[in-house]
C-alpha cells in the first residue's frame, strides 16, 4: 500500500492513539524519580558513559540542570563519575550496577504493564499488533535516533490455541527429564545383581546422573538465555534419548553408566522450560506455569520410582530402563512440534573456563556427598578434597566476576533476594531430601531389625504417591495464594510444613499409614516451596536471564539434595552398632531432629527475605 492509498486523517488518528497510549503508559510506571532522571539512566544504559554536556543535549535540559540531576543520582548510587581514558581532562558519567538494575526493573515494569493490557485483547487484535511491529520499531528508532534491537514476533504472548499446546508440552518435558533421571533409585539392587557388581558400584547409576545434571545445568542455562534456546533443548533431548538407548541395549556396565550420565544431562532443561514460559505466555499465566514446572521437576521422582520398580519386577532392569527410552523419545517429538524459537536480539556465550572450574568443583562436592565411607574411613582425605572444592568455587567466582560473558551472573546472584532464596533452597533442599530418604529407607527395613515394614521396592515406591499428589496440589494452589501472600512468606510457611512432616515422622512411625501421612505432609510442603521459589528469584531477574538464574538455583538444589542424602546416611551409619546390619530406631529420630533444625533455618531465612522486601519497596 502506498501513502496515497492511506485515508486522509489516518496519520493524525494513529498519532493521537499512540500519544494517548504513551501518556497512560507513563502513568503506570514507578514514580520514584522524575521522567528526566529515568530517561538519563536509560540513555547511559543504551549508549554507555557520556559527558554531562552530551546528556544535557540528549535530554533537552540545560547543563546546570543536568549537573544537579547527576549529583542527586550519584548520591543515590545510581551513577558515578570516572575519568576518560582518552582525555584525562574529561569526566564521564557512568551507570553503576545499581543503576543498571534500576533501569532493568523499570523497563520490566513497563513491559509487564503492556503485557497485561495485551492479554485482554482478542487473538485478531494481537495479530494486528504483531503485523505492526516493524512500523513501531521504525518509529522508536526515529524518536531515539538509535537502532532498536530486533523485536521478534515470538516474543509476544502466543495465541490462546498455541498456549494450550505449549503449556502441556512444557509440563511433559519437565516431568520426563525428572522421572528418567530418578530411574536409578529403585533399580540399584537389581543392577548389582544383573551386572554382577557391588552395591557401591551400582549406586553410581544414580550418582552419575546427578553429577552430569549438576554440571550441565549452568551451561544449558547460559545457552538457553541466548537466541538458540530451541536448538539447545532439542539437542539436549537427543542426548537424553541416546543415553536411554544405551541403558536398554545389552552392553557392559560401563555403557550403562554412560547412558545414565547422558540421561542426567536432561535435568538442566527444567530452567529452560521456565524461560520459554516466561517469554511466550502472558505474565499472569506464565507465573502459574513456572510454579508448576518447578513442582513437576520435584514430583517426577515420585512418578518414576514405583513405575520403574514395577517394570523391574516384571521384566528386569532392561525393561525398566526401556520406559525411559519411550518417554524421552516422546518428549523430543513434543519439543520439536511445540516449542517456539527464543526472542531475537539476545546473545549467549559460554564461559568455557568458568564452566570447567565449576564442573570440577561440583564433581568434588557431589562425590564427597555420595562417598559416605570416605568420611568414616579416611576423614583427612575427605576434608582435603572438601577444601579443594571450596577453593575451586572461590576461583570460579573470581573468573565469573572478571568475565564479560559469565556462565552465571554472580553480581545478580549476590542480590539479597536471590542470595537469600538460594540459601533457603540449599538448606531446605538438604532437609527435604533427608526426610524423603529416611521414610523410604525405613519402609524397606525388614521386620527383623525390630522396626520397619520390609516392603518390596515397588510397594515402597507407592509410599511416594502421597508425596507426588499433594505436591501437585500445593503447586496448583500456590499461584492463587501468592496474590495475597508474598512469595518469601510462602517459602517460610512451606518450610514449616516440611518441619511438621519431620515432627510427625519422629513421633509416629509404627504404622504404615503414619509413613504415608508424613510423606504427604512432605509433598505438600515441597510443592509449595518449589512453586514459590521462582517468584522470589524472577522478581529481580530480567526475562533474558530467566534460564540462567533458575539454572543456578537448580544447581544449589542438587547440591542440597545430595548433602541431605549424605547427612542422613552418616547419621544412620553412626547409629548402627558393631556387628549390626541396620541402625537403631533412635538414629531415625536423631536424623529427624536434625531435619527440623534445617527447616527452622530455612524458615528464618525466608522470613528475613519477607522483612527485606517491604523495606525495599518503601525505600
Image (tube, rainbow, N blue to C red):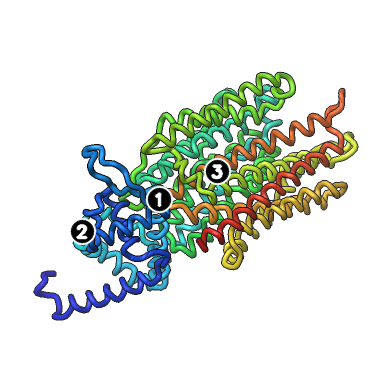
N-terminal-most mark, 2 or 1: 2
Question: Which residue position holds label 2?
Answer: 57
Q: Nearer the viewer, residue 365 or 128?
A: 365
Decide: marks 3, 1 in contact (CB < 8 A)?
no
Whole-percent x, y for residue 434 in the image: 71, 41
Q: Which residue is mark 1?
A: 544
Q: Real-space Cα distance between discs 2 and 1?
A: 31 Å
Residue under the point 32% across and 51% down: 45
Dot 2 surroundings within 10 Å: few (below 14), some, or many (20 or more)? few
- Is 528 positioned to the left or the right of 58 in the image? right
Would you say 549 lies left or right of 80 here?
right
Q: Which mark is residue 555?
A: none
In the rendered structure, find residue 554 and report the number of the disc placed on it: 3
**Looking at this view, is 580 or 167 the one in front?**
580
Q: Position of residue 163 (x, y in %)?
A: 44, 61
Secondary element at tag 2: helix
Cα distance in 3D space between marks 2 and 3 = 47 Å
- Residue 154 image position (x, y, % from top left): 34, 57
Instruction: Work out how far the residue at label 3 is from the one at label 1, CA to CA, in angstroms.
Output: 17 Å
Which mark is in front, 2 or 1? 2
Amino acid at each position: 500500500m502506498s501513502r496515497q492509498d492511506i485515508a486522509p486523517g489516518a496519520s493524525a488518528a494513529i498519532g493521537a492513539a499512540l500519544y494517548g497510549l504513551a501518556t497512560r503508559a507513563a502513568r503506570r510506571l514507578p514514580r520514584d524519580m522524575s521522567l528526566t532522571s529515568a530517561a538519563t539512566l536509560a540513555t547511559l544504559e543504551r549508549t554507555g558513559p557520556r559527558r554531562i554536556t552530551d546528556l544535557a543535549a540528549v535530554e533537552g535540559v540545560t547543563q546546570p540542570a543536568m549537573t544537579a540531576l547527576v549529583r542527586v543520582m550519584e548520591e543515590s548510587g545510581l551513577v558515578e563519575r570516572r575519568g576518560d581514558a582518552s582525555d584525562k581532562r574529561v569526566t564521564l558519567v557512568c551507570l553503576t550496577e545499581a543503576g543498571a538494575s534500576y533501569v532493568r526493573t523499570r523497563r520490566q515494569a513497563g513491559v509487564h504493564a503492556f503485557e497485561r493490557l495485551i492479554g485482554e485483547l482478542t487473538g485478531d487484535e494481537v495479530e494486528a499488533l504483531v503485523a505492526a511491529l516493524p512500523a513501531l520499531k521504525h518509529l522508536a528508532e526515529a524518536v531515539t535516533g538509535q537502532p532498536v534491537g530486533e523485536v521478534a514476533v515470538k516474543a509476544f504472548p502466543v495465541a490462546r490455541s498455541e498456549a494450550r499446546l505449549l503449556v502441556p508440552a512444557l509440563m511433559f518435558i519437565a516431568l520426563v527429564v525428572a522421572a528418567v533421571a530418578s530411574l536409578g533409585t529403585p533399580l540399584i539392587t537389581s543392577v548389582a545383581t544383573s551386572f554382577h557388581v557391588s552395591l557401591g558400584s551400582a549406586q553410581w547409576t544414580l550418582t552419575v546422573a546427578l553429577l552430569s545434571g549438576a554440571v550441565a545445568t549452568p551451561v544449558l542455562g547460559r545457552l538457553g538465555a541466548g537466541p538458540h534456546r530451541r536448538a539447545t533443548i532439542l539437542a539436549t533431548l537427543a542426548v537424553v534419548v541416546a543415553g536411554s538407548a544405551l541403558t536398554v541395549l545389552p552392553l557392559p556396565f560401563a555403557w550403562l553408566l554412560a547412558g545414565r550420565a547422558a540421561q542426567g544431562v536432561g535435568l538442566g532443561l527444567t530452567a529452560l522450560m521456565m524461560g520459554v514460559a516466561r517469554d511466550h505466555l502472558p505474565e499472569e499465566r506464565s507465573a502459574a506455569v513456572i510454579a508448576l514446572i518447578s513442582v513437576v521437576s520435584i514430583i517426577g521422582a515420585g512418578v518414576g520410582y514405583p513405575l520403574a520398580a514395577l517394570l523391574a519386577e516384571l521384566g528386569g532392569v532392561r525393561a525398566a530402563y526401556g520406559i525411559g527410552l519411550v518417554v524421552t523419545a516422546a518428549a523430543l517429538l513434543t519439543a520439536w512440534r511445540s516449542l517456539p524459537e527464543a526472542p531475537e536480539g539476545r546473545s549467549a556465550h559460554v564461559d568455557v573456563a568458568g564452566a570447567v572450574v565449576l564442573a570440577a568443583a561440583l564433581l568434588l562436592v557431589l562425590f564427597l556427598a555420595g562417598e559416605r565411607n570416605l568420611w568414616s574411613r579416611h576423614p583427612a582425605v575427605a576434608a582435603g578434597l572438601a577444601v579443594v572444592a571450596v577453593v575451586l568455587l572461590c576461583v570460579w567466582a573470581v573468573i565469573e566476576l572478571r568475565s564479560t560473558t559469565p556462565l552465571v551472573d554472580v553480581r545478580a546472584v549476590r542480590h539479597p533476594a536471590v542470595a537469600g532464596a538460594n540459601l533457603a533452597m540449599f538448606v531446605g533442599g538438604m532437609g527435604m531430601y533427608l526426610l524423603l530418604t529416611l521414610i523410604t529407607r525405613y519402609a524397606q527395613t525388614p521386620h527383623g531389625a525390630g522396626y520397619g515394614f520390609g516392603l518390596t521396592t515397588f510397594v515402597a515406591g507407592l509410599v511416594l504417591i502421597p508425596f507426588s499428589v499433594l505436591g501437585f496440589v500445593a503447586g496448583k494452589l500456590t499461584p492463587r495464594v501468592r496474590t495475597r501472600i508474598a512469595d518469601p512468606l510462602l517459602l517460610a510457611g512451606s518450610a514449616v510444613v516440611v518441619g511438621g512432616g519431620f515432627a510427625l515422622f519422629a513421633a509416629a512411625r509404627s504404622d504404615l499409614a503414619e509413613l504415608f501421612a508424613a510423606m504427604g505432609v512432605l509433598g505438600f510442603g515441597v510443592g509449595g516451596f518449589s512453586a514459590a521459589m521462582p517468584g522470589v528469584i524472577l522478581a529481580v531477574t530480567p526475562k533474558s536471564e530467566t534460564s540462567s538464574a533458575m539454572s543456578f538455583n537448580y544447581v544449589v538444589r542438587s547440591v542440597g539434595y545430595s548433602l541431605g542424602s549424605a547427612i542422613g546416611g552418616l547419621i544412620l551409619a553412626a547409629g548402627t552398632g558393631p556387628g549390626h546390619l541396620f541402625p537403631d530406631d533412635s538414629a531415625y529420630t536423631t536424623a529427624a531432629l536434625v531435619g527440623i533444625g534445617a527447616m527452622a533455618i530455612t524458615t528464618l531465612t525466608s522470613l528475613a527475605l519477607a522483612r527485606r522486601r517491604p523495606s525495599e519497596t518503601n525505600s
